Image (tube, helix red, strand yellow):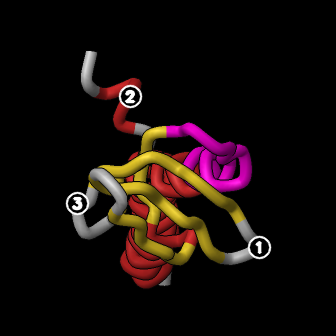
């Protein structure tokens, strides 16, 4: 009977370490993948909400321009000369004046 109890004990210990490893994997994935992505999304949302006339921006399509007018969901950007484009705020990616230095 004693050997029967010893045989079942490692199986239970192995099961606990399995769950600990699974939890550790999720913690590592959150720390290295999900957390930085959330931080980047918050910074991008902060950038989009702080837009003002004259800011230099890049759209997700790679179009460089200067902000001319801002509405609730759209932004009018001056691309070149008299060319102006109205784009969705979500299409603005970053401020390229900080990148090009």
Q: Which of marks 1 and 3 precedes in the sequence? A: 3
As measured in the structure, the alpha-carbon distance from the residue carrying label 3 to the one carrying label 1 is 22 Å
Q: Secondary structure at mark 1?
A: loop
Q: Quadrant of the C terminus?
A: top left
| Mark number displayed over residue 97 | 2
Q: Estimate the x, y position of residue 17 in percent, counting from the top left.
A: 44, 62
* Residue 52 painted magenta: yes
Residue sitting at 22 percent across and 60 percent down? Answer: 62
Magenta range: 42-55
Badge 3: few (under 14), some or many (20 or more) residues near its Cα, within 10 Å?
A: few
The answer to whether residue 65 of the structure is visible from this angle is yes
- Circle 3/circle 2 CB separation < 8 Å: no
Q: Nearer the viewer, residue 43 or 17?
A: 43
Q: Residue at x 53, y 50 (%)?
A: 67
Inter-mark Cα distance, 3 to 2? 14 Å
The x, y position of residue 12, in whole percent, is 49, 76
Q: Which residue is mark 1?
A: 72
Residue 62, disc: 3
């Amino acid at each position: 009977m004693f050997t029967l109890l010893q045989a079942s004990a490692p199986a239970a210990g192995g099961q606990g370490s399995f769950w600990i490893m699974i939890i550790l994997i999720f913690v590592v994935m959150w720390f290295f993948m999900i957390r930085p992505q959330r931080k980047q999304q918050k910074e991008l949302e902060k950038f989009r909400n702080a837009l003002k006339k004259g800011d230099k921006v890049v759209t997700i399509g790679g179009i460089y321009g200067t902000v001319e007018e801002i509405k609730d969901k759209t932004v009018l950007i001056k691309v070149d000369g008299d060319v102006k484009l109205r784009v969705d705020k979500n299409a603005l990616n970053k401020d390229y004046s900080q990148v090009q230095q």
